[in-house]
Image (cartoon, grey):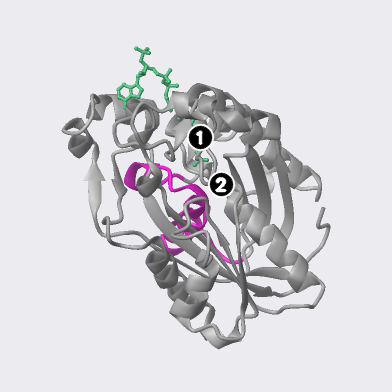
Amino acid sequence: MNKTCSYGILGIGSCLPEKILTNFDWEKMVDTTDEWITKRTGISERRVLEKNEPGHEIGVKAAKRALEDAGLNAEDLDLIIVATETPDYLTPSMSCLIQNGIGAKKAAAFDLNAACSGFIYSMTVAGQFIKTGMYKHILVVGCESLTKAMDWNDRNTCVLFGDGAGAAVLGPVEEGYGVLNTCIGAVGEMGHNITLPCCYVNEAEAAKRQGEDKRVFWMDGSEVFKFAVKIMEYGTNKALEEIGLKLDDVKLIVPHQANIRILEGAAKRLGVTSDKVFSNIQKYGNISSASIPVGLNDAYRGGKINKGDNLVLVGFGGGLTWGSAVIKWSK
Ligand code: ACO
């Protein structure tokens, strides 16, 4: 638990691929309807990388925008952490590809996989380096190419996801501002509910997948749904309670965007109105670790966040993992 801290977000940016795939496009590809997708998920469209377009390039663009927003140069960075569950390669890591793409010659670089909770995990890790004084400026990027890992014939999953990248530059901020607390956790015994095989696929996992390609995403949506609604409430309350804050002290909750019904369910359990829970799922679908920084960027640039506002970030995902954070906005 981080009782006090003086690190925060100095700059933020995002990049979404240009290509848009609407629900009506999906109607032509799988047995689905715009009505089903809209009603069951809240998603209308998502951004999709072209087949020959690598994921790290949107990460590079998001990183450059975050650096510009922070008023810093790539050479000011000491470390780059990229949260991803869909790297272009296992090696070189996405963080090394982005380090090269932005020219951050002095920065160390590694990837971190906590699925959709990855941005909060990465922010938590970055905070430890800054608080101890080991590093000053750390770039954290959530960068995903989920549509490249989908079974495009599995209507249960393919319509839910999109591609995107969001980045934040973290560094020292005024005392009392910045990241006030973070909580992270994992429930490995529920991991079988979301699987994306890489170097090993066992028979049970292979049997879940109908097509020839077994290295594709699979999810038990209803099990994840139940976990998500409970953990959003738990994570939000825990992060606030540990530092003596209440929901009334919070201006905006910026959650992971997986399903509008999860956001509505969590809002109801927390006893807050839906305007206190940020949502852009309609435009992007689920973009995993990129979801929270892209949401934060949209909220910030859309004028929903001002200096001194308390924000809660909260997410959940494969692993299963979860994370929450309280930030007093310092920009
Ligand atoms: N179009 C039409 N029908 C569909 C579609 C579709 N795209 N997908 C599923 N259906 C059908 C099912 O086949 C099922 O039909 P049946 O009753 O004849 O069997 C019916 O719709 C209902 O299916 P459910 O799975 O019960 O639908 P549900 O209301 O639970 O919605 C969904 C499914 C959207 C996946 C929901 O469970 C969900 O959002 N879960 C959470 C997902 C999540 O949060 N993931 C985050 C982590 S992801 C990560 O880590 C990258």
Residue 58, given in percent of the width and then of the height, sits at 38, 65
**In-image side of 214 versus 293 (left or right):** left
Nearest to the observer: residue 193 or residue 46: 193
Residue 223, given in percent of the width and then of the height, sits at 55, 23
**Residue 22 sits in quarter:** top left
Asked if disc 2 is less than 8 Å from ligand 1, the answer is yes
Whether residue 251 is visible, yes or no, is: no
Task: Please check the rendered image and state whether residue 83 is part of the magenta-colored stretch, yes or no.
Answer: no
- Is the residue marked by circle 1 packed among few (<14), some (14-19), or many (20+) residues within 10 Å? many
Nearest to the observer: residue 318 or residue 43: 318
- The three-letter code of the residue at mark 1 reads Leu
Q: Residue at x 58, y 35 (%)?
A: 272
Q: In which quarter of the image is the C terminus?
A: bottom right
Alpha-carbon span between mark 1 and mark 2: 18 Å
Whether residue 267 is visible, yes or no, is: yes
Which quarter of the frame holds ligand 1? top left
**In-image side of 309 versus 41 (left or right):** right
- The residue indicated by pointer 2 is 115
Circle 2: element type = helix
Circle 1: element type = helix
User: Which SS type dominates the magenta stretch?
Assistant: helix
- The residue indicated by pointer 1 is 263
Magenta extent: 279-307
Task: Please check the rendered image and state whether residue 288 is part of the magenta-colored stretch, yes or no.
Answer: yes
